Image (cartoon, rainbow, N blue to C red):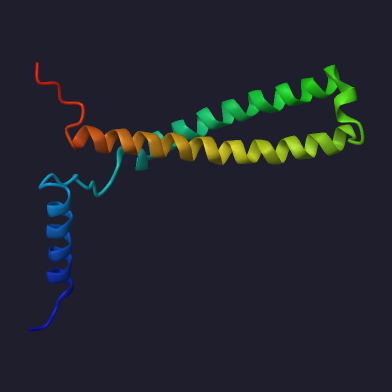
Amino acid sequence: MKLTREFIRELINEEVSRMAGGKRKKVLKESIADMAKYQDAFEEMAMKVSEMFYDDMMKLFQEEPEAFEGYSREDWDQQVVYAQQEIDTGVATAIAQELEKIEMQLHDGQYFDER
């Protein structure tokens, strides 16, 4: 008997289902988090957070200069900008991942209330 990709996939699916006690989580082909309007919103939120972070870090440099001995304002500005770039990507990614997780739970019936 020749093992086809489909046959192997079905065996894996059956084993996963058996191991989960017959309850197999649904797999979505596409999440709403992949939609452009959501991606734009995630990026907009992340940019707002990173701009607030930048402003606060630059104020901190002015308010407590003794805490930054050995750094020039330019050095500090460069470091804050690099951190800001990580916030831009990290926050947007974290929001998208959390939304996708919640969407999967919703489709899997985890928010169903049997009242």
Is 36 displayed left or right of 87 in the figure? left
| Percent of width and height locating residue 24 | 16, 47
Name the residue: 82% across, 35% down: 76
The outermost residue toward the bottom is 1
| Percent of width and height locating residue 42 | 46, 33
Q: Is residue 19 above or below residue 65?
A: below
Is 90 displayed left or right of 77 in the figure? left
Q: Quadrant of residue 54?
A: top right
Q: Quadrant of residue 46?
A: top right
> How many numbered marks does the figure carry?
0
Name the residue: 85% across, 20% down: 62
| Percent of width and height locating residue 61 | 82, 24
The C terminus, quarter of image: top left
28 vs 22, nearest the viewer? 22
| Percent of width and height locating residue 37 | 39, 34
15 vs 94, nearest the viewer? 15
Q: Is residue 114 above or below residue 84?
A: above
Name the residue: 78% across, 20% down: 59
The N terminus, quarter of image: bottom left
7 vs 41, nearest the viewer? 7
17 vs 88, nearest the viewer? 17
